Amino acid sequence: AGGAPIRREDARFVVARGGPDGGLEETFWAYALSPVYGDDGAVVAVHNVATETTARVRAVTERERLLAEAEAARAAAECTADALRASEERLRLATEAARMYAWEFDLRTGTPTFSADAARVAGRAPSASLAENLAAVHPDDRAHVADALEAARRDGQGFDYEMRTTPDDGGTAWFRVVGTVLRDPDAAPARAV
């Protein structure tokens, strides 16, 4: 006759596996111990059924570690995204308050790109064509602007100049243009911003 078993899942045991290094190994086992009673009701033996669960425990531990890393990476990305959104909002508010806009000029293709608020600040919608944007510059300033952009393209020089443009309302608007040149991996001038 037998009694109620005592069960344990994933019990940790350090065992000698008898490998070449003779080292000890952390293992995990599920087991059930059941008393075996004699005719007089005394325990005469213990029946033990054990199954090694080391591989499963390690797999679960690794999965939990990977999930924790993924959650940490997601949280870090969320914090980074929040910080980026806050930084972009501060930049938007600062440029709006200063009545400024951002621009970029690809020195290799001659293609300008403007921030969304350029039309509001400049009083006219900028063009994706450098020639059309230069046409909006006051005739007395056009050569100076073209020379500054050409020097940036040729020599990688930054620039700082004032110019006048003609907004859609027909008036005249003054702008101070400050730019720096960014180089490509070969150190050639690539973009003016």
Image (tube, rainbow, N blue to C red):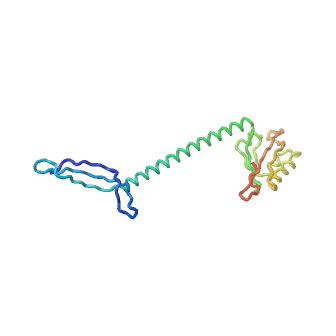
Asked if residue 62 lies left or right of residue 35, the reply is right
Q: Which residue is more in the foreground, 140 or 105?
A: 105
Q: Which residue is more in the foreground, 39 or 109?
A: 39
Q: Residue at x 32, y 56 (%)?
A: 52
Q: Residue 70 at x, y = what percent?
A: 50, 49
Q: Residue 172 at x, y = what percent?
A: 84, 39
Count every numbered label the image shows and give the total.
Answer: 0
Residue furthest left in the image: 40
Residue furthest top in the image: 97
Residue furthest right in the image: 140
Q: Residue 161 at x, y = what percent?
A: 83, 44
| Residue 20 higher or lower than 132, as above or below | below
Find residue 56 and report its image quarter.
bottom left
Q: Residue at x 80, y 49 (%)?
A: 158
Residue furthest front in the image: 22
Q: Residue 76 at x, y = what percent?
A: 55, 45
Q: Residue at x 62, y 41 (%)?
A: 85
Asked if residue 8 lies left or right of residue 173, the reply is left
Asked if residue 141 lies left or right of residue 113, the reply is right
Q: Which residue is more in the foreground, 48 or 124?
A: 48
